[in-house]
């Protein structure tokens, strides 16, 4: 084996993201193989492994909820952040910031309680609650990132005859991207944990074994759901860390062409 190949294998072996993904995959696909472990840890339980649904299906459903709600939060949050940093939208900044802050101060359970009678049970009320709950970090990250762009960069771009739209797309957003991604990272991690509450309104998620365990006094179910949710949050957080470093390198210089 060449020295370069050895270095790559050593780097991969030390990569926490790779280890976290491996642990998550093994746990999701091999939970049933841990029956002896949970049976020994919880000898009073007749059913130490959650089997009402597969953890693969629960993880996919959980990720779908997080992806859809986070996408909605990103679109609305970045658009709002851009709007209130433009000259035409500055007067609306206090209103927008107060509104998104209110969206996070209201507990998701309260949003679900209000939405269920109007919309019904299922994924829709969960998506609404998660989308509202994830707005604040994205709006704050977008505003902070755009305001951190040096005025000299904007002036240089304007001196080259670039329009306001091109300055935003080619200069401001690339330079602000690491801070924006940090806001998206916080919002997404919040949603990973909060999405477990979707099980309370009939939406399939990794919160299902936790809710079933709480209602049936089955601690093993609670542990299984919580550990998978925690590992999923770690994997996503490490992936965003990798993405942030890439965005920092790519956005070190704006595109003036």
Image (cartoon, grey):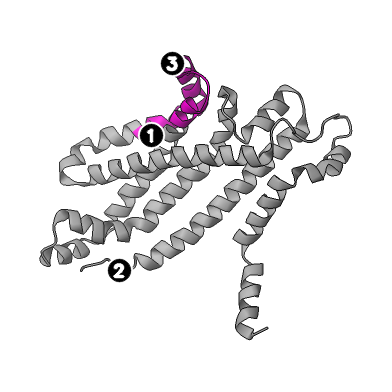
State which mark lies toward you, 2 or 3. 3
Q: Is residue 117 magenta?
A: yes
The residue indicated by pointer 2 is: 253
User: In the picture, residue 38 is in which quadrant?
Assistant: top right
The residue shown at (54%, 51%) is 236
Q: Main secondary structure of the magenta part?
A: helix
Regarding mark 3 in the picture, which secondary structure is present there?
helix
Regarding mark 2 in the picture, which secondary structure is present there?
loop
Q: Is residue 204 visible?
A: yes
Query: Residue 240 in the image: x percent, y percent?
Result: 49, 55
Query: Residue 193 in the image: x percent, y percent?
Result: 57, 39
Residue 157 lies left or right of residue 127; in this view the side is: left
Measured Cα–Cα span from mark 1 to mark 2: 32 Å
Query: Residue 104 in the image: x percent, y percent?
Result: 43, 33
The residue shown at (75%, 47%) is 30
- The magenta segment: 100-129
Q: Which of marks 1 and 2 is nearer the N terminus?
A: 1
* Above or below 151: residue 189: above
Measured Cα–Cα span from mark 1 to mark 3: 24 Å
Q: Earlier in the sequence, mark 2 or mark 3?
A: 3
The residue shown at (46%, 31%) is 127
Residue 15 lies left or right of residue 182; in this view the side is: right
Residue 41 lies left or right of residue 77; in this view the side is: right
Regarding mark 1 in the picture, which secondary structure is present there?
helix
Measured Cα–Cα span from mark 2 to mark 3: 49 Å
Q: Is residue 249 magenta?
A: no
The residue indicated by pointer 3 is: 118
User: In the picture, residue 257 is in which quadrant?
Assistant: bottom left
State which mark lies toward you, 1 or 2. 2
* Above or below 16: residue 46: above
């Amino acid at each position: 084996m060449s020295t370069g190949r050895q270095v790559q294998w050593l780097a991969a072996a030390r990569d926490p993201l790779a280890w976290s993904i491996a642990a998550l995959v093994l746990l999701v696909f091999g939970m049933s193989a841990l029956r002896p472990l949970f049976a020994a840890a919880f000898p009073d339980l007749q059913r130490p492994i959650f089997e009402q649904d597969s953890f693969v299906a629960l993880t996919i459903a959980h990720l779908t909820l997080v992806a859809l709600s986070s996408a909605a939060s990103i679109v609305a949050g970045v658009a709002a952040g851009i709007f209130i940093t433009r000259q035409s939208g500055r007067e609306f900044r206090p209103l927008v910031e107060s509104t998104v802050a209110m969206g996070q101060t209201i507990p998701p359970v309260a949003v679900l309680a209000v939405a269920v009678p109007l919309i019904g049970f299922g994924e829709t009320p969960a998506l609404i609650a998660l989308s509202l709950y994830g707005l604040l970090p994205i709006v704050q990250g977008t505003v902070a990132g755009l305001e951190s762009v040096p005025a000299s960069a904007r002036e240089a771009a304007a001196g080259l005859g670039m329009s306001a739209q091109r300055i935003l797309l080619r200069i401001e957003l690339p330079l602000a991207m690491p801070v924006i991604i940090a806001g998206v990272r916080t919002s997404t991690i919040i949603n990973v944990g909060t999405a477990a509450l979707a099980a309370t309104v009939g939406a399939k998620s990794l919160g299902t074994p936790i809710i079933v365990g709480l209602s049936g006094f089955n601690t093993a179910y609670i542990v299984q759901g919580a550990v998978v949710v925690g590992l999923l949050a770690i994997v996503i957080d490490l992936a965003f860390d990798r993405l942030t470093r890439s965005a920092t390198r790519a956005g070190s210089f704006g595109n003036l062409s």
